[in-house]
Image: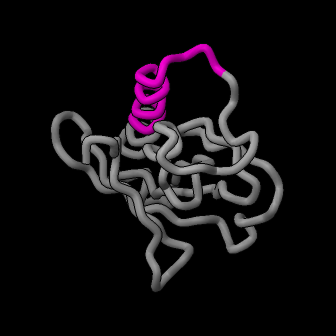
Amino acid sequence: WGYMDFLGWRDPQAPDRAYIVAAWDGRPVGVQLRSSDAGSWQTRRSMCSMCVTVHTGGVSLLVAPRSGKAGQQGNSVGAYMCSDLACSLYVRGKKDAGVGARLHESLTLEEKIQRTVANLAAFIAKVTE
């Protein structure tokens, strides 16, 4: 767990569903996500908005219903994320997304981790507001 900023997985029985559990205000919060469709696994290069990893066919538009009344009215929040939700591993170099997957940046590893956590926190804030 020392290298995981959040727990994320795809539902093997329903590939269009994914889940994230992360710390939010000192407690765990779970978010159910849906991918737009099976076409999100296309072979074009896309960037994850959480960890800024570039993938060829490995980024999906994942959408979560907003909480409360907004969610009951059908409002949702979406973000382009690593399809396998392994952002923590990509940022730390523990998983390879292929040639050109990591942009050359002047940020330290800790700063990249903080950016990933901040991007996820901003996404969860939009879901829960």
**Vertical arrangement, residue 102 with respect to residue 30, above or below:** above
Where residue 75 appears, x then y in whole percent? 52, 54
Q: Image point 50% across, 81% down: which residue?
A: 14
Task: Work out whether residue 19 or residue 74 is closer to the camera in this orientation and state it.
Answer: 19
Where residue 58 appears, x then y in whole percent? 67, 58
Could you tell me which quadrant the C terminus lies in? top left
Please state if 30 lies on the left or on the right of 94 as rendered: left
Q: How is the image coloured?
A: one colour
Q: Image point 16% across, 36% down: which residue?
A: 26
Where residue 28 appears, x then y in whole percent? 21, 48
Where residue 47 appears, x then y in whole percent? 69, 42
Please state if 101 lies on the left or on the right of 113 as rendered: right
Q: Image point 69% across, 42% down: which residue?
A: 101
Q: Image point 47% across, 33% down: which residue?
A: 116
Q: Is residue 37 magenta?
A: no
Task: Work out whether residue 45 or residue 126 is closer to the camera in this orientation and state it.
Answer: 45
Residue reaching furthest top? 106
Residue reaching furthest bottom? 13
Task: Work out whether residue 46 or residue 27 is closer to the camera in this orientation and state it.
Answer: 46
Task: Give the magenta range.
Answer: 105-121
Total numbered circles: 0
Q: Examine the residues drawn in magenta and state their main secondary structure.
A: helix
Task: Work out whether residue 87 or residue 49 is closer to the camera in this orientation and state it.
Answer: 87
**Vertical arrangement, residue 13 with respect to residue 8, above or below:** below
Residue 83 position by quadrant: bottom right
Q: Is residue 120 magenta?
A: yes
